[in-house]
Amino acid sequence: MTMGLRPYTQRTGNGLGSPSFDVDQGEVLMHVLPAVGIVFDNRPPEFPGTLYISSRQVVWLSDVIMAKGYAVDFLSMSLHAVSTDPEAYTSPCLYVQIDTGDDEELENSDSECHGEESENFDLAAVREMRLVPSNPNELETLFEIFCQCAELNPEPTGDEEEEEHNWFFGADQLEQMPVAGDDEEQFSSIPPSSIGHSNGDHDQLARTVLQLQINDRRFEDADEMEPENNGKHC
């Protein structure tokens, strides 16, 4: 699943057309609301358009430009609320916060998505969306439908990811691991993709590293013997 806002241009049927939902996977149309404006971050509103709400996503299609449309999954929405405060926005609207999944990239894209004069902006970096119906009385119904669809799309628990990245070892697994200090066994088990692999000659690599270790021990012995020379230096 793609996180965040994305362009949507798939239309079916005659006239202005309507979105094409994945009916085979259980996606169903929940509500349609015409004459809705849409606002991203601090950009100017886009109007008019028709809002389509399915059991998985929200799609807004322009009534003027057939190639213009936007969509966002409910799993990417972290918050939605009815806003009627004129200091927050000039018109009553449904305020939605969007989770893009990449905060570091967003910091670098703020100037692009917040620029009111720019025609080209990064949809994936948009974090705020306002849906402005021409009839404010529709807001309560719109809010309730958003709540219903949010319940149909609970956040993933992450159990599968934890299982894939489980770095804890049992006692039986530890017994099968090579014992530290057993140089021959360790070097003979170097996988082909390891760093330091040289044309697949693992034995040569093992002998070279073992020789370096022996030389290191000799240097250590020499350092320990220096005080016995009565402080004389050449």
Image (tube, rainbow, N blue to C red):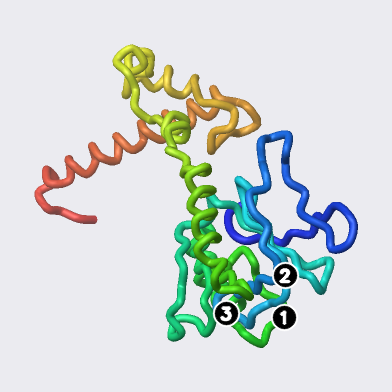
- Can you tell which quarter of the image residue 91 is in? bottom right
Residue of label 3: 114
Residue pictured at 57% horizontal, 68% vertical: 126
Residue pictured at 29% horizontal, 34% vertical: 217
What is the CA distance from the residue labelled 3 to the residue labelled 2? 22 Å
Q: Residues within 10 Å of mark 2 (few under 14, many from 20)?
A: many
Residue 35: percent from left, percent from top: 69, 71
User: What residue type is disc 2 on?
Assistant: Gly
**Dot 2: element:** strand
Residue pictured at 15% horizontal, 53% vertical: 232
Name the quarter where the C terminus is drawn.
Answer: bottom left
In front: label 3 or label 2: 2
Q: Residues within 10 Å of mark 3 (few under 14, many from 20)?
A: some
Q: Nearer the viewer, residue 166 or 162?
A: 162
Which is more N-terminal, label 3 or label 1?
3
Q: Is residue 7 left or right of residue 108?
A: right
Residue of label 1: 119
Q: Is residue 227 above or below residue 77?
A: above
Residue 71: percent from left, percent from top: 66, 58
User: What residue type is disc 3 on?
Assistant: His
- Can you tell which quarter of the image residue 218 is in? top left
Q: Is residue 205 left or right of residue 133?
A: left
**Dot 1: element:** loop
**Dot 3: element:** loop
User: What residue type is disc 1 on?
Assistant: Glu
Residue 144: percent from left, percent from top: 50, 55
Residue 30: percent from left, percent from top: 63, 49
Residue of label 2: 49
